[in-house]
Image: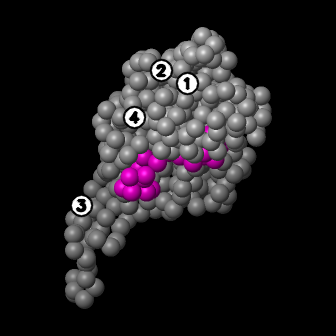
Amino acid sequence: MLKDKNIIVGITGGIAAYKTASLVRLFVKAGANVQVIMTPNAREFITPVTLSTLSGKPVISEFFTANTGQWNSHVDLGLWADAMVIAPATASTIAKMANGVADNMLVTTYLSAKAPVFVAPAMDLDMFKHPTTKRNLELLRSYGNHIIEPAAGELASHLIGKGRMEEPEKIFEVLDRFFEKGQDLAGKRVMITAGPTYEKIDPVRFIGNFSSGKMGFALAEECAARGAEITLIAGPVALNTSSPAIHRIDVMSAQQMHDAAISEFATSDVAILCAAVADYTVENALDHKIKREKDEIPVIRLKKNPDIAKAIGEIKKPGQVTIGFALETDNEVENAKGKCQRKNLDFIVLNSLQNKDAGFQVDTNVITIITSDGKALEYPCKPKTEVAKDIVDVLVKDYII
Ligand code: CTP
């Protein structure tokens, strides 16, 4: 997908700069034209000769080339690029980008670039956690830049935490997928709830359900592949995500999922409520294990959980789109239509439990999409990854401006 694409690779002064040589190599092997721009500090971590040899073009670091008096035009570079990748991006460069500081060739070119920008932060864990860094990354997201989240692990400082630049292969894959698909969700923020919730009875027991989370995770990957930034609020599931555009928040109970969803929805364009949320929680949950020897049989009293979809429907602002799911066994279409209206959803995805290839645990699904004006679109049985495409197609075609 990257053949003949013009890619600016920006390198800043962090130890992860040595890995960017592999990234340049991967781009070149895929047939891309690569122009490396280094900040002055990046040159301390990796030699420009390595990068100009790998990219086949002299590296640019300064506004002027000293011996020729030639001016390096950031404007021309900005127009030339089909994509710009800044890897590693230090806290300082991120701060400059967020605030329009143009004091070196890289950040000046960033300001001129019209192409999609991908930022792969790399720094120590405390710098990454700092409110300033968080705020600056939020600002970059709000400009439509793609943040390739750093990985967690041992850092160059030997501390363990989040801040390690994502591996070159992963960064390459993000760009490859970006050009593979239509980026019809570029710049959009999508919040997705997925999986079951567990309601605690005592420290070892819970009330749960059979949801595997597969549908919600497939939706997260699909939205990410189409350019969105995702917050995936996941109940207890045994699944992993692959796109770095997916920011995952793990929760256990319905109340935790509700709190995370309400706070994330404020900055989301779209909410997909895919989780199988427990309708009730245990009112008399115990913090010690219930023992079997006792004569009396324990009685579990239940109380209602918050309805996340309904709460989101109540705070929804014009321009925000909400999508729900309905799992029904009888009066399917009527019940789904009722839920769509009650929860102020734009559309609802009905999956029938009458079909053995649909619903919990299985890899396939059979859906009907019911819109708020009562239209019903029926689909045949498909893998959940394909079903996710169908759902996102409707979202993009009819609801995203
Ligand atoms: N939902 C939610 N919070 C809840 C219950 C449901 O966000 N406490 C969402 C689900 O994620 C789904 C939609 O609401 O998108 C419908 O869920 P469903 O369980 O089918 O409906 P309920 O409102 O729970 O109604 P019932 O159990 O009576 O069918």
* Viewer-side residue, 344 vs 151: 151
Left or right: 36 with respect to 306?
Answer: right
Residue 169 lies in the magenta stretch: yes
Closer to the chain start, of discs 1 and 2, is: 1
Q: Identify which residue is drawn at 73% across, 31% down.
A: 56
Closer to the chain start, of discs 3 and 2, is: 2
SS at circle 3? loop
Give the residue type at disc 2: Asn
SS at circle 1? loop
Give the residue type at disc 4: Ala
Q: Residues within 10 Å of mark 4 (few under 14, many from 20)?
A: many
> How are the colours assigned in the image?
one colour
SS at circle 2? loop
Choose mark 3 or mark 2, whichever is in front: 2
Q: Quadrant of the N terminus?
A: top right
Q: Would you name the residue on which mark 2 appears? A: 104
Part of the protein shown in magenta: 153-174
Q: Which mark is residue 283?
A: 3
Residue 113 visible in rendering: yes
Closer to the chain start, of discs 1 and 3, is: 1
Q: Would you name the residue on which mark 4 appears? A: 91
Mark 3 vs ligand 1: CB under 8 Å? no
Q: Position of residue 165 (x, y in %)?
A: 50, 45
